[in-house]
Each structure stands twice: as C-alpha cells, then as structure tokens.
Image (cartoon, grey):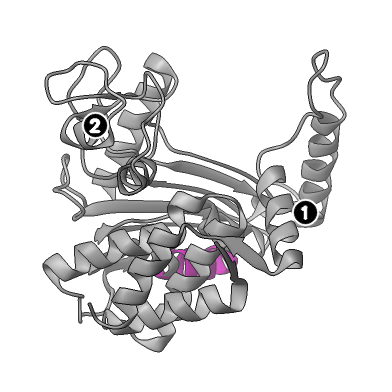
Amino acid sequence: MRLALSEARSLVESVLVTLEHTDADARIIADHLIDCELRGLQYGGLPRLVSIAERLQRTGTSREPVTVVHETPVSARLDGKDNLGYLVGYRATEIAIAKALDTGLAVVGANETWYTGMLSWFAEMAAARGLVSMSASNATAWVAPHGGTEGRFGTNPICFGFPSTGDPVIWDIGTSAIMHAEVVLAGRLGTPLPDGVAFDGDGSPTTDPAAALAGAFAPWGGHKGSGLGHVVQLLGVLAGSPPAPPVLAGFGFLIVVMKPDLMMPEAEYREMVTRYAEMVRNTRPVEGGNAVRMPFDRSAADRRARIAAGVIEVDERIHARLLELQAGR
C-alpha cells in the first residue's frame, strides 16, 4: 500500500511515544527510520519499528539517559543505558562533531545499546559539518566466520564519510551476506532468502528465515569480508561491548571524526573529493551496463525522488501491525 510521508512519520512517532519514548527521542528515531524508507532500504524502515517494539515489549524501555562515563578533549566514552542505538549513535556523533570542530580530531565510543541502524545517517551528520568520519558497530554473533557455520560476530556495519561540494561520498556496508533486518522481514512476509547467505542450526545451507535466525548468516565477501567483520567486532569491544554481545543488547558503537584542515584547507579537500567522484562517474561502463556510480549516489537519488513523490510503499501487514502498536496492543 502507498502511505503519504507525513502519515508515515506521524504513525512512527506515535508508536514510539506509545512505547514510552519522549517526543524528542521519537522524532530522532523517526527521522532515521523514514530516511531508510526514502532511500529504498525498506527492511530498515517501518518494519524495523515492529522489531524495535518486540524488543521493548520484552525488556521495557530504558528510562535512563545516555551518560558520559569518561572524557578527554578529543574523546568520550558513553554508557548507552540500554537505549536504542539510533539515539545512542546520534548522541555520540553530536559529541564527536563538537570535539572535532574544536580540536580537529575526535573519537567517541558507546556501549550498552542495540540496533544502531544506518551508520551513513551519522556520516551525513559529520559530512554536513565538513568532517570526514569512520564509524563501526558490532552486534550479536549472528554471522559465521569464513569457513564456518556458527555465529561468531555480528552483521557489523562499517562506514566512511567524506564531505564534497555537493552530496557527500559515503560508503556504508554490513559485513554479512544478508542483514539481520532483511532476514526478520523475510520471515514476517513469508518469503525465502537468497541462496548462499545463511546456514541452519546444523550448519546446512538454508533459505528459510526461521532456520537462518536459529543458525548463522554467511559473511560478505568471503575471507575479506569476514576479516572486516572481525575488525568491527573488536572496534565495538574498544567502545565497551563484550566480545560476544547478547541478543539485542550490549552492542558497541565507535565513531572517529576529523577536520580536513588537519591536512589541507577544507574547501580544497571538498573540491578534490568532488573531482574524484566525477572521475569515477565518467568511467566507461561495461558493455550494456549502467553508468558508473559513486557510493551514496543511488541513496541520494532515491531519497529525492520519494520526497518529490511524497509517498512510500508499505506492506499492508506491517502497516496493520503498526496500527495495533499505536493502539497499545
């Protein structure tokens, strides 16, 4: 079904308030979820809110604010107090940006959180202030290392962001062959998974979402992606998570932010990023192929198109469940 953007945002914020978030926190989370929808990442949009609700109905909503437990002029360590990662990541990024604008460089880590969402959301926050960023978040051990069939690290996104004279250049990937939210959504909608992305509890390949959730996901990119997954897991540990966070709890989020003018004038760097991006876009494509894109080009174009249309597509089953949650059921 088609849902007006204004109606979708209102529904999301209303559900979050019903789940005992403040109006201010509901707006931050809604911004994140709606942006997923605008960028075509539906599994991270309104369906993710159903998963958030299920987790909060099981554990309750944290009533404690995110707390700074250690701080220096260039760093901070946050205790997320079991708040949703969209909020914890937002607060960590705000602190990192402020410190980097003051000192040139900042690193902020946060633990005791879950569901950190699109790391590109935080990279955009930094790029909008002219800052380069790197962020990473570990998670529950849903992903098998290369050559294995048992979960040992999370879906573990890692993201790099660069300001330019136009849209930022942002590369944001998960290090698993399929994201946890995609598997959960496939289970809700009764659709199979692609071949080769998951194992069941006995270590056999599976396309059944329920079996995959009881087993493990494959790593993205073979041994190279698996190695990157290990890196993110350990960056999360540096942020304060345990080596193997429990189910939807105890995740670690780390962000490093820097001013280009540590190396050169910011305007000069932005111009060079733009020039490089245009060089890449002007690459001759393979025969019969589409134009070459830079990371984030598709997301930015899809977002503009959906904002112009003013509507998003939402599965009727997801919409119906959100209406139930809005009513407190």
The x, y position of residue 83, in whole percent, is 26, 69
Q: Quadrant of the C terminus?
A: bottom left
Q: Is residue 50 left or right of residue 131?
A: left
The x, y position of residue 126, in whole percent, is 59, 60
Residue 87 visible in the displayed image: no
Over which residues does the magenta segment extend? 91-105
- Answer with the quarter of the image where residue 58 lies: bottom left
Cα gap from disc 1 to disc 2, whole angstroms? 49 Å
Count of numbered labels shown in the rendering: 2
The x, y position of residue 92, in whole percent, is 40, 65
The x, y position of residue 214, in whole percent, is 16, 35
Residue 215 visible in the displayed image: yes
**Which residue matches tag 2?**
212
Q: Is residue 197 above or below residue 115?
A: above
Q: Is residue 60 left or right of residue 83?
A: left
**Which residue matches tag 1?**
265
